[in-house]
Amino acid sequence: MTSAEWYSSLFQFIGIIISFATFIGSVIAIYYTYQNLKEMRKQLNEQKKQYFEQNRGNIVFYICKSTVGITHDLIIKNFGNSPAKLISLNITPDLDWSKAGQTGVDDFNVTKLKDIFLAPQQHISTVFDFTKFEATELDVEIKYITCDKEFTEIYKIDINCLHSVLTLEPKIDDELSALKNINKSLVAISDKFI
């Protein structure tokens, strides 16, 4: 073998090694590119899911003490940012509307509501008197549709907590104290919106 042939064989061998190293580098680059795209797809799906959760309708049934009298307000509210349609509301044990504390309230039985459209932040409410109610917990099942998906929420409401809610009313002695209480109320309301 002459030196020219030997150098030619050496350059061919070095060329094959460089080509093989380039091939291995390309395979590694393709692998990491694939992993990167897979992670980006996962993050995109997570962002879509998070966006949906932030912007979907969210209908909740809850009870709060009425501002007037001894009754409680039963409220169905869409806390979400999209419209929602109430399919059904089941409360166990059933509320005895003949003991609701008001006359004619049976016509406003919230458990009979079906297929009600609620815009974002819209609510429906009625009153109920729990003073003669014997159960201590309510099992709530609420079904609704929002953004073309159906949701079922199941939770408990402890009625004993409702009777323990304390409400305070300001003491108004004169016009100045009335104006101060009005000012405090307006500041409290505006703080909720900020």
Image: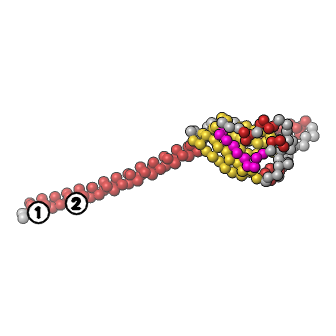
* Sequence-first tag of 2 and 1: 1
- Here the colouring is secondary structure
Magenta region: 86-95
- Is residue 91 shown in magenta? yes
Looking at this view, is 22 or 152 the one in front? 152
- Is residue 94 shown in magenta? yes
Q: Quadrant of the N terminus?
A: bottom left
In the displayed structure image, the side of residue 48 where residue 110 appears, left or right? right
The nearer-to-camera label among 2 and 1 is 2
Residue 77 at x, y percent in the picture: 70, 40
Q: Amino acid at mark 1?
A: Trp
Looking at this view, is 139 or 123 the one in front? 139
Q: Amino acid at mark 2?
A: Ile
Residue 122 at x, y percent in the picture: 69, 36
Residue 5 visible in rendering: yes
Per the picture, the main secondary structure of the magenta-coloured stretch is strand
Residue bearing mark 2: 17
Q: Quadrant of the C terminus?
A: top right
Figure check: 179 above or below 158: above
Figure check: 115 above or below 42: above
Residue bearing mark 1: 6
